[in-house]
Amino acid sequence: MADFLDQKLDDVVRLGPTRVVINEQGEATTYVRALTEYNVNYDVVFIRDDGWTLGAPSHLEAVAEEMWRDKWVGIIRRRHKAEPFVMVYGVTPSVVSLAEEGREDA
């Protein structure tokens, strides 16, 4: 599983996630369209068990998490815009756990 997640991290860094959530209703579009047409970038990426990825800005993280809660196998995130993305291993995505980590935007 670690190799699979490492590959997904590389893919996301190079190409962006498969889709990016653009609003509170959970609508999502391609990374390029999210950025160019909606001015939405991602801070977190959820990796589904089939390799599909869903990015979201921090304020829409909970919306993205809920979409396939039982299917997420990994999370890629950055704490601040200037930092690189890192893989979060061995955790189940959860807004509760993010709040416990002291995240201001959780």
Image (cartoon, helix red, strand yellow):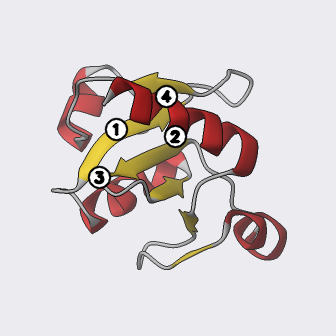
The residue that disc 3 covers is 49
Nearest to N terminus: mark 2 or mark 1: 2
Q: Secondary structure at mark 1?
A: strand
The residue that disc 1 covers is 74
Q: Amino acid at mark 1?
A: Gly
Query: CA–CA distance between discs 1 and 3?
Result: 8 Å
Nearest to N terminus: mark 3 or mark 4: 4
Q: Are marks 4 and 1 in contact (CB under 8 Å)?
A: no
Above or below: residue 65 compared with residue 73: below
10 Å neighbourhood of mark 2: few (<14), some, or many (≥20)? many
The residue that disc 4 covers is 6
Instruction: Please name the residue shown 41% across and 35% down the image.
Output: 4
Residue 51: x and y in percent read 42, 53
Nearest to N terminus: mark 3 or mark 2: 2
Q: Amino acid at mark 2?
A: Lys
Q: Secondary structure at mark 4?
A: helix
Residue 97: x and y in percent read 21, 30
Q: Quadrant of the C terminus?
A: top left
Query: CA–CA distance between discs 2 and 1?
Result: 9 Å
10 Å neighbourhood of mark 4: few (<14), some, or many (≥20)? some
